[in-house]
Amino acid sequence: MKTIPLIQFGLGGVGSAVAERVLAARDDFEWHYGLRLVYVALCDSRGAAINGDGFSHGALQRMLVAKAEGQSIVGLDSGYHHDGLRDIVDVAGTTDAIVIDVTASSNTTTALQLAIERGYAAVLANKKPLAESYEVFRNLVDSGRVRYESTVGAGVPVIASLSEALMAAHDPVRCIEGCFSSTLGYLTTGLQAEESFSELVRTAIALGYTEPDPREDLGGMDVARKALILARTMGWPLELEQVSVQPLYPAELGGGGVDDFLDAVHSLDDDYALRAAEAHIAGETLRYVALLQGGEARVGLQSLPLNSPLGQLQGTDNLIAFHSSIYDESPLVLQGRGAGVHGAAAGVLADIMALADHV
Amino acid sequence: MKTIPLIQFGLGGVGSAVAERVLAARDDFEWHYGLRLVYVALCDSRGAAINGDGFSHGALQRMLVAKAEGQSIVGLDSGYHHDGLRDIVDVAGTTDAIVIDVTASSNTTTALQLAIERGYAAVLANKKPLAESYEVFRNLVDSGRVRYESTVGAGVPVIASLSEALMAAHDPVRCIEGCFSSTLGYLTTGLQAEESFSELVRTAIALGYTEPDPREDLGGMDVARKALILARTMGWPLELEQVSVQPLYPAELGGGGVDDFLDAVHSLDDDYALRAAEAHIAGETLRYVALLQGGEARVGLQSLPLNSPLGQLQGTDNLIAFHSSIYDESPLVLQGRGAGVHGAAAGVLADIMALADHV
């Protein structure tokens, strides 16, 4: 039996789902894989709970209940400031530890770097540290102890397939195209069904598909970060500023509050209806696509043939198509639920299990 | 730099493609992964070439040229009989070795078992040893040192996704459906286009899509073995005889030679045309489907909605859809070229690289 200490940054939706999944899978992991996963530290934006000997099943469950009820898990006031996280990293006291970053913070990078220096492994669902400078990305990933499946397509094994089925098999990837936003998948499927853009935005908010400010999704930066991570995984030395991003709203709607935006967004309806109709006449449909080709990454709205993999995609599913020397006539395609805390938590678990074999 | 000795059983189409890929990827593997892959033994049905110190790049190339020209690579007469392969396994003399089974033989099992006992790892593109008794399967796979990506869907990461993205993430799979035969994909797409069954069979033979006797493909046993391997990967204790198999030709066409079969196969045309037309009227299409559900595995012709993942599949691509607790509303789908020596060789390479991290 091998014991792996876990240090988790973040205990929001995905973080709680990861901890719940670790609890639920405990017996299975011990039985089938001879692995015992033990939390030694968890922290959220308000502080940390630390136990060098490992939290018991019951203690962890009480923390999850407290968290779900809006209470604090704090045992030590550390939050997310760098020094706090760095202190927490030192708790594990063994190189077998895995640090799990399920925050949406850009302040975890130095703690992650410290963890890697200490010989730990790290799993990220957080895109931000991997979207900093290319040097930071390479330092983390080239350690061979960093995995980040959930940063693109949640639990759909996008990164594993790119790294292990294509690159490690010496099948160079020529081009990647994909839809990596459930929110924008919902919107473009709605445009295809002749619904109005502003109504779709309102419904997406009501369904909880968007960030509190929907412009976070409509601006394309989330998709751009995913495209950047894929490009860098292939060894393309891109920076985020080099990803060409086409937002779904004009710059003049970028200022002001959410309500101002929602008051003004109907002004875009006619234009989107026209573009959707033009696509329809051409036997195509609009999709918000990330395209990586020739060392460059672009994200934006495209009109694509209805019978193409991305044209056939409906609703909130994500899809990625890899074109390589082997997958030349038709691409290698992966499709599935690319959002939701359970998918993301499954991607984190898969990464933990893959690393547990190595640490 | 880590050196991994390779022992390869089989040097046909896939075997040669694997060796060529290892040669081509040599510098890349040393540079990016710090791995040196060195052949210490290769054998085909006529004998073996063995060099405990590892064959040089040039020697391996000469062997591949000789093989392509129909000459023998024999340095030692051993062929595939059990004792011969067992002797070869002992050549490596280190537990870091990986045995690669790219034969289509059912005689490699004891040598593979010996290799695992010795502490080696093994990669199989050969389905036969994994389709023997469930006990043999478990003995091999539970070692944690056996991978077999190419047995289902060639290089499409079907087994890795099932084992690592779903099972290791504690997301139990409820149902798998898929099309795992490029040949039968070609046939059913042709039936959808109102082509005659007998003409499609003849064209498939002419295009090299079938085994020399097309009944090997049409009988469904190849698909049944793939279904069995998937079921066993999920821990279902099935035997091959328990897989329900519906062949595409009646028993009375099973006897006799290939020419007799081809003379008689047109007698099936009207029936298939009728079934294709019935499917069309219902908004469906015929596909040769493997279905795993409730502990049971079935393979056979099914009529499926045109807008389902399998209904949308065209031509020789393979497709697999996993329904799990996370992928419940829509399945996790993988699609791509599931045949051809290069895809299979890429799957073998991916397995070698995954094991090289562990051996």
Image (cartoon, coloured by chain):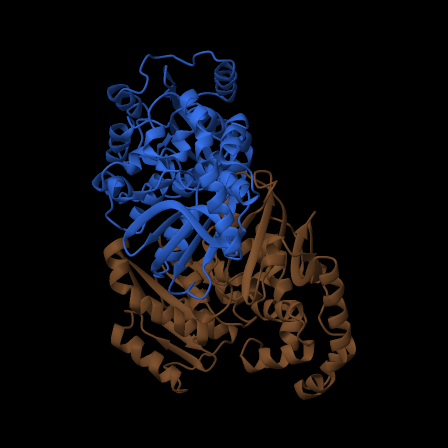
Chain colours: A blue, B brown
Residue projecting furthest to the left: A135
| Quarter of the image where one finds residue A167 | bottom left
Residue A46, above or below A250: above
| Quarter of the image where one finds residue B223 | bottom right
In the image, residue B149 lies at what x, y percent?
Answer: 48, 58
Residue A116, above or below B293: above
Q: Quadrant of the N terminus of chain B?
A: bottom left
Q: Nearer the viewer, residue A74 or B73?
A: A74
Count the numbered circles shown.
0
In the image, residue B298 lies at what x, y percent?
Answer: 70, 58
In the image, residue B124 lies at what x, y percent?
Answer: 48, 63
In the image, residue A34 lies at what x, y percent?
Answer: 48, 39
Question: Is residue A203 visible to us here?
Answer: yes
Residue at the spot 68% in from the left edge and 84% down from the top edge: B262
Position of residue B90 in the picture relative to residue B131 (left or right): left
| Quarter of the image where one finds residue A181 | top left
Q: Nearer the viewer, residue B269 or A122?
A: B269
Residue at the spot 32% in from the left edge and 12% down from the top edge: A77
Q: Nearer the viewer, residue A116 or A227?
A: A227
Residue A57, above or below B115: above
Question: Is residue B298 visible to us here?
Answer: no
Q: Nearer the viewer, residue A140 or B2?
A: A140
Residue at the spot 29% in from the left edge and 34% down from the top edge: A129
